[in-house]
Amino acid sequence: MYFLLKYENKLKHENKSINTINSYKNTINQFIDYLSNENDAVELKTLKPSIIYSFFDYKENNLKKQGEISINSKRIILVHIKAFFSFIETESGELLDFTKLFKSFKFKSIKQKPKTLDEDEEKKLLNAIELKKSEKDDFVSMRDALILKLMLYSGLRVSEVVSIRFQDFIDSDQGVYSISVIGKGQKQRIVYVNKDLIDDELTELLKIKSPKDFVCTSKSGIKVPRQNIDKMIKALCVKANIGKISAHKLRHTFSNRYVNELGGNVLHLQEILGHSDIKTTMIYANPRQEDVKRGYISTICTKNISKQ
């Protein structure tokens, strides 16, 4: 489709990641196919909310085998379609206005705390990677251990881990490595990881690899696709005898620990995770009641605040 090709080009010039561009393309292609196959000829100017609701039903019944699409997924689908049609508004020679079409959608917000590894699962997963290292003691085992620990101990996304080179690890005199990463929207930021947690892997890998090499490569230097990282984590889950987890669950585990177990600052966590909106980070802030009480006492009662 003419507009879709131009829209894809726009996203590329906005430095959107490949994953983001593909996500938009998939949604829009599915919607266009639906309009072509499931409905009589529909003109852009005659689009109605009922057609988009029917598209959700179509995805649930035909494209998504797991059943009902979550509210968050519907929001993402709507964001993709809305952005595409806004682009058509500006590019089309016709006077098109889709404002009313998308204004009518109201999805009830459901706040769900991200799923994380519990203490036992995390211990089993780390034991599994250490067992793998002891069994093989080879390049792949060391590399996989480093990848896993970077996500679990610094909250990195898979897409960020695959872009890290060994030379990006900057040693400091405070017991941490600082790592420069390129996140979503090609935004650069600095993350940190405790040296003691990854030094063994880093030292061994640098006996084989050059500082200019990417961390996520084969021994011969071929870059490892992100899908292989998901497969590696899945295999470790089997070895650890725990339920299947995603790479993003490791990021959630780090974030939850940082705020709720270690008392880290949410604003600092926002910077570490590369969130553009603090609301995204606040989902991890779930203080226990005893911590709220302790915070009140230390802030109010110890400051000698009395009746005026």
Image (cartoon, grey):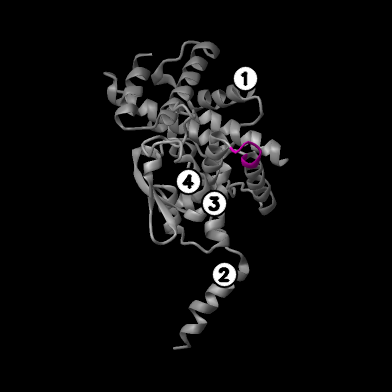
The question of residue 134 being in magenta is answered with yes
Determine which residue is flagged by label 4.
203
Q: Which residues are magenta?
A: 133-137
Badge 4 amino acid:
Thr
The answer to which quarter of the image holds residue 2 is top left
Q: Earlier in the sequence, mark 4 or mark 3?
A: 4
Q: Residue 149 versus residue 47: which sits nearer the camera?
A: 149
Q: Earlier in the sequence, mark 4 or mark 2?
A: 4
Q: Within 10 Å of the Cα at label 1, are there few (<14), some (14-19), or many (20+) other Cα atoms?
A: few
Badge 1 amino acid:
Asn
| Vertical placement of residue 298 versus 8, above or below | below
Badge 3 amino acid:
Phe
* Residue 242 visible, this angle: no
10 horizontally vs 214: left or right: left
* Residue 121 visible, this angle: yes
Give x and y (percent) for residue 10.
31, 26
- Alpha-carbon span between mark 4 and mark 2: 43 Å
The kind of secondary structure the magenta stretch mainly shows is helix
Determine which residue is flagged by label 1.
62
Which residue is most to the front? 207
Q: Residue at x 42, y 20 (%)?
A: 46
Depth check, mark 4 against mark 3: the one in front is 4
Determine which residue is flagged by label 3.
254
Badge 2 amino acid:
Val
On residue 292, which mark appears?
2
- Alpha-carbon span between mark 1 and mark 4: 49 Å
Whether pointer 4 and pointer 2 mark residues with C-beta atoms closer than 8 Å, the reply is no
Quadrant location, the N terminus: top left
Tally the marks: 4
Whether pointer 1 and pointer 4 mark residues with C-beta atoms closer than 8 Å, the reply is no
